[in-house]
Image: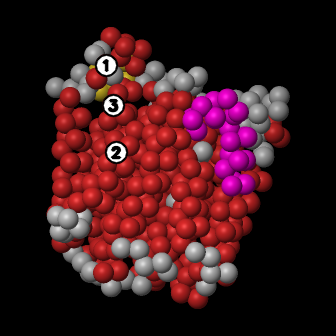
Amino acid sequence: MASYVPISEARQLPFWRRPTTLLFVMAMTMPVSFYTWYALLNNFVVEIAGFDGADIGLLHTIREIPGFLAVGVIAIIMFVREQVLALMSLALLGVATAFTAWFPSLGGLLFLTLLSSIGFHYYETVNQSLQLQWLPKARAPQILGWLMAAGSAVTLLVFVLIVIMWEPLGLTYNLVFMVAGGVTFGLALLCLIAYPQFEAPHPQIKKMVLRRRYWLYYALQFMSGARRQIFMVFAGFMMVERFGFEVHELTGLYLINLIVNMLVAPFLGKAVGRFGERRTLTWEYVGLTIVFTLYGGLYWFGWGVALAATLYVVDHILFGLALALKTYFQKIADPRDIAPTAAVAFTINHIAAVFLPVLLGLLWVVSPAAVFGLAAAMAMISLCLALMIPRDPEPGHETIFARGLPAPAE
């Protein structure tokens, strides 16, 4: 029978059974499956399934549908605790990843991608909610940075193993997918058994919450999702299609990227804590505008692979600053709104993800540079929105236009 422990009493537990430790374990469990799938996907669909740009765009559109439907988490948590739902979602991600290579066709990959995406997106939705409920505001930016670093360290391990073992051991897609999925599934079950159920201090509202005073947060989430899709879908695909990267070469690029991010992530959290959300998000969006513009130049001017690889790493570092969006919301939110708003925000974040990959996949066939030009324009819009964040956001002071106003009740 499950035991229930209030967050305020969790410090009395052994270190390995505390809520923050569980957040770290989950942060390190998810990448085993997701980033194995991510590292192998582009080569698998090109070499085995014979995908073109339109096919990969369709697959990523299907992958993002559960993110768009993340608002369904609100209905589920009426019957299932958030902590349990997060671990069940991780288990589903592991199972779907394990069987990916069993169905090397468009229809089969779309189905398994949908299942793994349900696990991934529902986990991410609930995990974000748990982080904001369990972490104290004063330390949240720093701990979020360390959580990013922990996830990057595990992803680094995954990439290292693929790089050094793929060719010497003659690994197959099926074996690697099965092992990675099995590890995630096993760790998720272990966490379900080993950890007590933690009680947050503020009971969550278990219905959809849309508040006018959160409008800037919603807008930033929408633009973040649209911009992220272009990078997630096409940056890696470009390295294979244009520059002919093989599995170990593409994974090697991911490896370099992860080493840099693992080292930088804790400092990103400190930067948010020191300089505030407005400044750090401004840096992110200025940097992303430059990066996406240069991505387009790779096609217009024929710049080489070294610049493409460098931009890929810089891109990931800048995206890490997006943790400032989490802490911005934590500062302006009613504590009871965190779970339902996390679900709503995840849905908003994925609105563009439902149609952008497939549409941009068709545009990619005509002009890859135009795809990255569109991403640069989106980054500039995000920059304009970020400048509306006040230096010290709080309830009633969510934007620069709301200075001195009390937080509305609705």
The residue carrying pointer 2 sits among few (fewer than 14), some (14 to 19) or many (20 or more) residues within 10 Å by Cα, namely: many
Quadrant in the picture for residue 65: bottom left
Q: Quadrant of residue 289?
A: bottom right
Q: Which residue has dot 3 on it?
A: 22
Foreground: 218 or 252? 252
In this picture, residue 207 sits left or right of residue 383: left
Q: Is residue 324 left or right of residue 77?
A: right
Which residue does the numbered mark 2 point to in the structure image? Answer: 154
The circle on residue 6 is none
Indicate how the structure is coloured in the image: secondary structure
Q: Is residue 399 magenta?
A: no
Q: Secondary structure at mark 1?
A: helix
Q: Specify start and end residues of the magenta stretch as a single range.
A: 267-287
Q: Position of residue 247 (x, y in %)?
A: 33, 69
Q: Position of residue 388 (x, y in %)?
A: 78, 45
Predominant secondary structure in magenta? Answer: helix
Residue 288 vs residue 186, the one in the foreground:
288
Q: Which residue is mark 1?
A: 15
- Percent position (x, y) of residue 153? 38, 43
Q: CA distance from mark 1 to mark 3?
A: 10 Å
- The crowding category of the residue bearing disc 1, from other C-alpha atoms within 10 Å (few below 14, some 14 to 19, many at least 20), is few
At horizontal 47% and vertical 34% (from top left) the residue drawn is: 146
